[in-house]
Image (spheres, grey):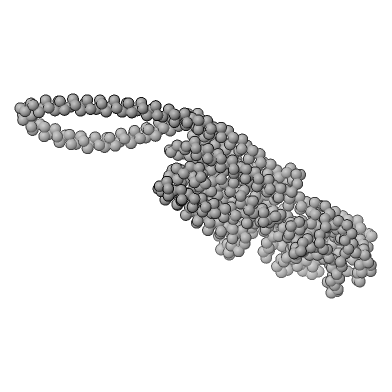
Amino acid sequence: MTQTIAPRVRTLVLLLLATAGLLLTTAGPASAHAALTGSDPQQGVVVDKAPDQVSLTFSEQVALSNDSLRVLDPKGKAVQQGKPFEVGGTTYGVKVHSGLPDGTYTVTYQVVSADSHPVSGAFTFSVGAPSVTSVSVSGETAGGGVVGWLYGFGRYLSYAGFIVLVGGGAFVLACWQRGAGVRPMQRFVVGGWLTLTSATLLLLLLRGSYTGSGKVADIFDLDLLGNVLQTKAGAALVSRLLLLAAAALFISVLFGAYDKREAEEKRDLTFGLAIGGTVVAAGLAASWAMAEHASVGLQPGIAMPVDVVHLLAVATWLGGLSALLVALYRSQTPIESAAVRRFSQVAFGSVVALVATGVYQSWRQLGSWSAFTGTRYGQLLLVKIGLVAVLVGIAYISRRWTAQLADTVVRQGKRAPQKERVAANASGSAKAAKSAKEAGGAEDSGAAKKDGGGKQAGGGKQAGGAKKAGGAKGDGSKRAAQLARQQAAMDTARQKRTRDADPHRFGLRRSVLAEAGVAVVLLAVTTVLTQTEPGRTEEEAKAAKAAASSSSSSSSAQAGSGAVTLDMSFDTGGTDGKGVVTVDVDPARVGGNEMHVYVQRPNGRAFDIPEVKVALTLEAKKIGPLAITPDHITTGHWSASNVQIPMAGDWKIAVTVRTSDIDQTTVSKNAQIG
């Protein structure tokens, strides 16, 4: 039976690894967790007058470099000047040369979102009239190519190493303390530490090229590495390396001094290792939570601790499951059913924590039921939920095998005293036979002593026989040692056959192997999920683009009547601080005008905020800012009458929105009035 298991195990593992690799290779470049929600000029618009700057609004804050924002003329020549700058909130801009000629211009951007993922893209606008352009916008992707694939693979390895390290250590310490002296278990946990350390170093080297040029040659650029160390993601990777040094000390104590201690000392050391290991494991988990999407967006103060608990629950469950698989397949020391039962209880608690934290994370990242099927993040999340459900079902089967195995051990324990009595009787009979044999030998010796003449006559012959006996004794000791080794190997093989022949243990091994296989695919899906734009962000970006498109068509429709409508996305950075503010100026001419201001959530729902202010500035004539404080009319609606505009021109309309006592931002757009 065991001869047929090994090939099946190898085949299943290879298939699972191939499936995981397929998921990783088809993930493509990292999808942005910050989305472009608006721009000025808007995408595809035709403006009468060339702008003096180009601004882009994202769904969250981003990090800029000197080449993050570029504006290219129809021939592909850069026309921006100076470095990109922050306009306000999540809006960023770059100045362009004055007096741009008519034609189609291409805006390209490559930034890093607040949750460490690269964001890139491009769009066009035209001055005067559209023209032919030689700039291609189809290839503007970030995090792709060989470097992007290596970075994704490094993320997968880092998650896998974390799960093996934390889960394996927790399994030994909490469930199977005898495993501290088992060599395969030691190699398993140390392998997790080596994998996580190597993957972290790889990510640190790849980070600069991954968020920048994407070139393999830039991987070992020390200047890029220095820049990475100054970012939030770089600091998180360095912190992870420092915590791995503490984890190495934990491993050396767990698999070194711990196994050699007496029971009394081991209890005290267990408590110390449990506290220290929990702190190190939580710190490692926090190195992901503080640098990725849990640290930005909605409720980051709650999301980061929840993310830490989620990662620890995953590691305890899946890592402990892998450790159990090693104990069942590789360890010569049989694992007790009590240890399996303890792990079953620990795994149940981990699943409960996993479900609770997963529900919160799903709500936070999706925001609506429609995002489950309408966004790629939601679709991947449905796959992950399905895999977790399959894992729980297989785990239930494993618990049944564990209970049956425990019953078998109890029955064997009841039969043990009877076997011991039989063995004792057999031992007594053997001792009696040996005593009788020794007595017979003594009688023969006595008879030999009486035969004195024979003794003297054969003296010389006896001396020669003694020498031969000495040589035979030496050969006999070597032969005995060889036989002892062979007997030990046979006993070990016999014990293994007996253990593998147990149908309950065999069933447990198969179910645990199936759990581990599903866990490999689940980890791959999770890795892809962390590189995918959250459903909430994707839906907000779609809503903002729809509003911008509606605003553009509305402005075109109202051009004959002179009315102006401007939509501007804002993010004050606080709770409930994202939305869209719409300003209507009618009839948008010199003299008195009616102004209406509307504030809506990203989903289009009107809501109130504490304060709205508007300021008008004609920069070309150095007029303004002219402050306007509209009156609150109804939910999400403010109005001001008889707004005097003294001169025609390209007026900058700036709106300041305050969503709390300390959270406010100012967004602006230009409009032709008069």
Q: Is residue 56 left or right of residue 647?
A: left
71 vs 370: above or below: below
Q: Is residue 276 left or right of residue 122?
A: left
Percent across and percent down for residue 141 are 68, 54
Q: Nearer the viewer, residue 10 or 145?
A: 10
Which residue corresponds to the image point at 81% horizontal and 57% vertical from the top-left?
580
The number of numbered discs placed on residues in the rendered structure image is 0
Q: Is residue 81 left or right of residue 610?
A: left
Q: Nearer the viewer, residue 179 or 30?
A: 179
Which residue corresponds to the image point at 53% horizontal and 37% vertical from the top-left?
341
Q: Nearer the viewer, residue 480 or 475?
A: 480
Which of the 4 image quarters holds residue 294?
bottom right
596 vs 344: above or below: below
Percent across and percent down for residue 658 are 79, 63
Is residue 66 visible to the viewer in this orientation of the structure? yes
Which residue corresponds to the image point at 88% horizontal and 63% vertical from the top-left?
631
Which residue corresponds to the image point at 22% horizontal and 25% vertical from the top-left?
436
Percent across and percent down for residue 470 are 18, 36
Which of the 4 image quarters holds residue 435?
top left
Is residue 44 visible to the viewer in this orientation of the structure? no
75 vs 528: above or below: below
Percent across and percent down for residue 318 are 56, 43
Image quarter (top left, top right, bottom left or bottom right) of the C terminus: bottom right
Which of the 4 image quarters holds residue 297?
bottom right
